[in-house]
Image: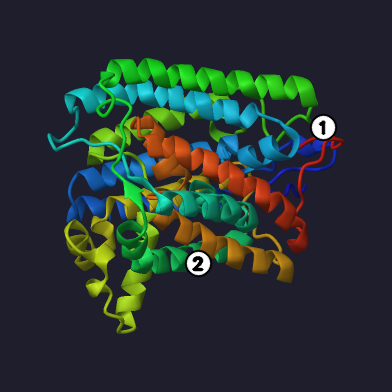
Amino acid sequence: MNVKVQPVEEVKEPVEKEKRALDSPQTKLIAGGAAVGTALLIYLFATQAISQPILLLIGLGLGYTLFHARFGFTSAFRKLMAVGNGEALRSHMVMLAVAVTLFAPILAFGVSFFGGEVSGYVSPVGVSLFVGAFMFGIGMQLGGGCASGTLYAVGGGRSIMFVTLLFFIIGSTVGAYHLPFWTEEMPSFEPVSLATSTGLGYGGAWVLSLAIFGLVALITLWVEKKKRPPKQAPVPSVRGWKRILRGSWPLFAAAIILAVLNALTLMTRGSPWGVTSAFALWGSKVAMFFGIDVSSWGYWQGANAEVLQSSIFADSTTVLNLGVILGAFLASAAGGLFRFTRITLRNFMASVIGGLMLGYGARLAFGCNIGAYFGGIASFSLHGYIWGILALAGTFVALFLRPFFGLSVPKPKDTFC
């Protein structure tokens, strides 16, 4: 039985009951993935700081969770803006509520596993944030996924996402080159923390954050009552204890797991989970290989200069990304779902344009759906909330662009969205 894996896309037609079953586990792929993961783990233990192999394991957990729950940011924004289905966005609110509950004491007391400094993602608010987040919102709807979605879709074998990832890296590298213009020449304000910039403290900021999340959840319920949108499509699964290993997982369970893993990341490396800084690093490394003087760019000055000159395996974000891809690969193989999918000219062009906008937008906006939206809001940063609003605005615009590339948009009369 062929079950098409759709890690970040919607199913438009009714899903028959028998099509929800999973194929047998792809044992050869599981064995191969386990061998690669073990070899990488041993290499990191032998050559890098102890935090790196720990982060690889955390990344594996993130990828496994993302795939089994089909936990999307792109599809969540699209379903809300297109038909008013807010189920996935409510799972975001659960994730953020758990995250701020964990982050507040970690940031307030500097809790870490290895005694280093701990800091959240609190970034400036300015033109670069507004432009970058809006671009990212459009890009993820054309490219077929956000930052985390791109990684776990690649791990699941969705062929077109390899194109998105390639141009995501290119866009991020160009964005790194242009970033000084956007941050130094364009208007910008100092970072604003709900905890430290307002006098609320982490306790007060935590209460305010929970109130905001609750309000957002209530608004989505009100919208659903008014619009009566189609339900979210079911995904292939099994019953009983096997569901833990083979999926699918409930969105709200995955939201809690992702928040816990992000808190573990914060305590392990001193900063929250991020994705796209590694893309700028990978692209810049390739540019250096071809003789481009990347080290002269403003982006690679200061603390970033050492990152550029070091091995990519010394970069914690790179290790997390590799873990996410590998974790998603193992999850897809466990469900018998790993297989490459078809690429057409139109979705190829959408992935090229979307990937470039994703990468460039992430650099301008000081992060993506993970670093800015998830990590920023969990760190009590105002820029995280603004990122979410502008990405939703970009999503709305992209709803009118997707059909030009043969990409579907949920409709009120669909059975599922």
Q: In the rendering, at what x and y percent does residue 41 appear?
A: 30, 50
Image position of 349 with respect to 370: above or below: below
Image position of 378 with respect to 401: above or below: above
**Disc ID at residue 320:** none
Q: Is residue 1 visible?
A: yes
Furthest residue toward bottom: 291
Image position of 285 with respect to 372: above or below: below
**Disc ID at residue 17:** 1
Query: Relative to residue 167, is residue 383 drawn left or right?
Result: left
Q: Mark 2 or mark 1, which is nearer to you?
A: 2
Q: Which residue is mark 2?
A: 166
Furthest residue toward left: 115
Q: In the rendering, at what x and y percent does residue 226 appear?
A: 77, 22
Residue kind at label 1, given as amino acid type: Lys
Q: Residue at x 77, y 57 (%)?
A: 403
Q: In the rendering, at what x and y percent does residue 184 appear?
A: 30, 59
Image position of 397 with respect to 380: above or below: below
Classed neighbour count for the residue bearing mark 2: other residues with Cα under 10 Å, few (<14), some (14–19), many (≥20): some
Q: Is residue 8 visible?
A: no
Q: Residue at x 19, y 31 (%)?
A: 112
Residue kind at label 2, given as amino acid type: Leu
Task: Name the element at disc 1.
Answer: helix
Task: Name the element at disc 2.
Answer: helix
Q: Residue at x 87, y 36 (%)?
A: 413
Query: Relative to residue 335, is residue 402 drawn left or right?
Result: right
Q: In the rendering, at what x and y percent does residue 119 appear?
A: 23, 37
Quadrant in the rendering for residue 308: bottom left
